[in-house]
Every structure is written in C-alpha cells, then in structure tokens.
C-alpha cells in the first residue's frame, strides 16, 4: 500500500481567506482573552509587514497600524478539515483525518483508476488550489511516513 498525505499547514487561515474580499491584504487570526490577545496565524502579506504567529496583538498594532483581524475559530477549522476529508473520498476509499491539519489517503489502489502518482498528485493539487487551500503532499509506504515527509518537503 502507498499512502498520500495532504498537509494543510494553514487550514484555519485559508478557511478565513476564502471568504475575505481582499485576500492580499494583511490578515491575522487572533485568539486569547481580551487582556491577552495574540496572533494565532498570519497571511503572507501580514508576515511580510513583520507580523508573526504568537505575537501579542498590542505589539502587532505597534508594528503595523493597518491590518485586518479575524477570530481564530477551532470549530470552523475542524469543519473544513472534515469537509476536505469528505472531498478526499473522491480519490480513495480509505481516508483518515487522525492528525490535525492533515488528511491521509490510501493512494496505491487508486492508481489503476486515476492514473500513476504524478497524475494523481496533480489532480489533488488542482482540486485543492481551486478550493483555496494551501497544501503540501507526499507519498510514502505508511500513513505516518507520508505525514512526516509532507512536513519536511512538498512533493
């Protein structure tokens, strides 16, 4: 068996960016109590402006005066994780979402139907790009190995 892992490194942020009118504008997901707000994740524009995950919201405002914020919603991220797991069933009959921000699917049996790995991988990437989710994909003999490889490199 061969397993493909689709790692979704910024699942919560991508879920928010899908409904943002201007995804190129600096955006940060915030979390914490009113007194201790911090940045949970930032998009590329916010990172380029100097913001980073873990930073206090007050420090972020001192660095960058004009950026958008959205509340980090773990329940929404989980809903999108389940949605993407359901989407993965288009490509394989064995799908697992046992790790956060990752979907693992048995790919070897799908090669007969969907073509060899390069074509299969291209199809996964095209679908995820169309859905608006950044991803890293790896293929390995076990689910955990696929997860580790996707965490280290894409492809």
Image: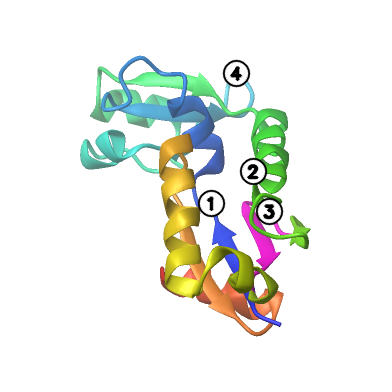
Depth check, mark 3 against mark 2: the one in front is: 2
Q: Residue 102 is drawn in which quadrant? A: bottom right
Per the rendered image, the range of residues in magenta is: 99-107
Disc 2 to disc 1, C-alpha distance = 10 Å
Depth check, mark 4 against mark 1: the one in front is: 1
Disc 2 designates what residue? 84
Depth check, mark 4 against mark 2: the one in front is: 2
Depth check, mark 2 against mark 1: the one in front is: 2
**First of labels 4, 3 by sequence position:** 4
Dot 1, how many residues are within 10 Å of its Cα: few (below 14), some (14-19), or many (20+)? many
Image point (48%, 36%), residue name: 131
Residue 103 percent location from the top left of the image: 66, 57
Q: Is residue 100 magenta?
A: yes
Q: Secondary structure at mark 2?
A: helix
- Quadrant of image for the C terminus: bottom left
Disc 1 designates what residue? 8
**First of labels 4, 1 by sequence position:** 1
Disc 4 to disc 1, C-alpha distance = 29 Å
**First of labels 2, 1 by sequence position:** 1
Image point (50%, 74%), residue name: 116
């Amino acid at each position: 068996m061969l397993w493909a892992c689709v790692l979704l490194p910024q699942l919560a942020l991508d879920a928010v960016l899908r409904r943002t009118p201007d995804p190129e504008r600096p955006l940060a997901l915030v979390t914490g109590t009113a007194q201790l707000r911090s940045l949970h994740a930032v998009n590329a524009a916010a990172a380029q402006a100097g913001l980073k995950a873990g930073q206090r919201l007050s420090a972020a405002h001192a660095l960058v005066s004009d950026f958008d914020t959205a509340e980090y919603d773990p329940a929404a991220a989980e809903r999108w994780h389940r949605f993407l797991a359901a989407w993965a069933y288009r490509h394989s009959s064995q799908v697992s979402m046992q790790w956060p921000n990752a979907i693992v699917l048995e790919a070897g049996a799908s090669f007969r139907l969907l073509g060899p790995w390069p074509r299969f991988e291209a199809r996964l990437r095209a679908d995820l790009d169309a859905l608006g989710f950044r991803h890293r994909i790896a293929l390995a003999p076990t689910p955990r190995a696929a997860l580790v490889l996707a965490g280290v490199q894409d492809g």
